[in-house]
Image (cartoon, grey):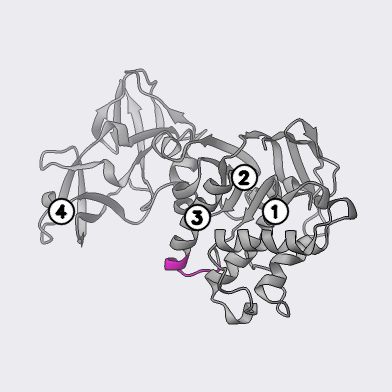
Amino acid sequence: MKVTLQNLTKVFPGRNKQVSEDVIAVNDFNFEIPDGKLIGLLGPSGCGKSTTLNMISGLEKPTSGKIFFGEEDVTDLSPELRGVGLVFQNYALYPHLTVKGNILFPLQNLKKDKKLTKEQMNEKVEYVSKLVQIDELLERKPSELSGGQQQRVAIARALVKMPKILLLDEPLSNLDARLRLQTREELRRIQKETGITTVFVTHDQEEAMSISDMIVVMNKGVMNQYGAPQEVYEDPKNLFVAKFLGTPPINIFYGSVRSGALYIGKTEVMKAPGLDDREVYVGVRPEGFIINENGPLSCDLERVEVMGRDTSIVARHNYFTGAFIRAIISSEDAPRSDLKTVSFSLKKNKTYIFDKITEERLYLEN
């Protein structure tokens, strides 16, 4: 099922004297979610991603704009009539019911024209419980399950009605690191097997990039960029997107463009054909540094961290915007840890230039 959002806006009115101004949670959002794809809504807390999800589900009514499921306008349709499945961060399982009872619950509450027989309901429960691999846990209560198992029950309950759209709001936040990795792989497998259009909300960029067909990076209620995860990582349109994606994060320097060259401080680090003179931010991905004793970017070496195949070089520079530069290089090229300084050349395809005022990406001429 294709989902189309047209000029979607949500404004929350100020509710007290201290905060009297309206809050624009989602601002003129236009987006089409392709049929059968898993889309990650990604951004920091307060960026509007959960509000967008709630408007798609019908839990929040848009201030303006339209929502279409396929060709049907569902903007004013109540949540129970939209055919969506919802999975929340806190699982929201009924503690007094068994796993089977929790999964059965939405089927037992179907309206008369959609009512199922007991045999049909049991068949659906059997199917989804096997799909999420909890078919041996059906007689247990939620309190007898691990966090990962409880999350699978919540997913099974959302899937049992075979919804048109599956909406996942921070579904892995309460799991430990190992379970998060395992469960997100399971989510991707389940989505592929069912072919249900899925919207996955998270603030964890690694999580979103690993399982999404496409990601939407949001900030302050506005879509900053949309595309395949690797494409967005390699071609950020502005400073926010560049800083938000990547682990370790991108390294940002104060720089300038002068006479067709890019400078960090007083040092020319590369040519900048086609750019006018201006103050800029220079972003270098951790993998964008090349150890070079004659390289133009000389930094104070803080420490060398060996990570097996790769080595992380932690360094300082007077024109760096943060505390420490972090460069990832091959362990074969690692410098001696007793050195005071380390010099780098920069990879052109891993170095990004942003206007200091607008923070929009500036592109070099080929």
State which region is magenta: 174-179
Task: Describe the element under mark 3 as helix, strand or loop.
Answer: loop
Q: From the image, tell me which residue sits under label 4.
A: 331
Crowd class of label 2 (few under 14; some 14 to 19; many from 20; radius 10 Å): many
Instruction: Check whether the beta carbons of the residues at disc 2 and disc 1 lie within 8 A of each other.
Output: yes
How would you rate the neighbour count of disc 1 (Cα within 10 Å): few for under 14, some for 14-19, many for 20 or more? many
Q: Which residue is mark 2?
A: 196
Q: Residue at x 77, y 60 (%)?
A: 107
- Quick one: label 3, few (<14), some, or many (20+) residues within 10 Å? some
Which residue is pictured at 26% across the width and 50% down the height? 327
Q: CA distance from mark 4 to mark 1?
A: 47 Å
Q: Amino acid at mark 1?
A: Gly
Query: Do the CB atoms of the residues marked 4 and 2 lie less than 8 Å apart?
Result: no
Q: Amino acid at mark 2?
A: Ile
Q: CA distance from mark 1 to mark 3?
A: 22 Å
Which residue has dot 1 on it? 85
Give the mark nearer the N terminus: 1 vs 3. Answer: 1
The amino acid type, in three-letter code, at marker 3 is Asp
Q: Earlier in the sequence, mark 4 or mark 2?
A: 2
| Residue 321 position in % (x across, y down) | 38, 48
Label 2, secondary structure: give it. Answer: loop
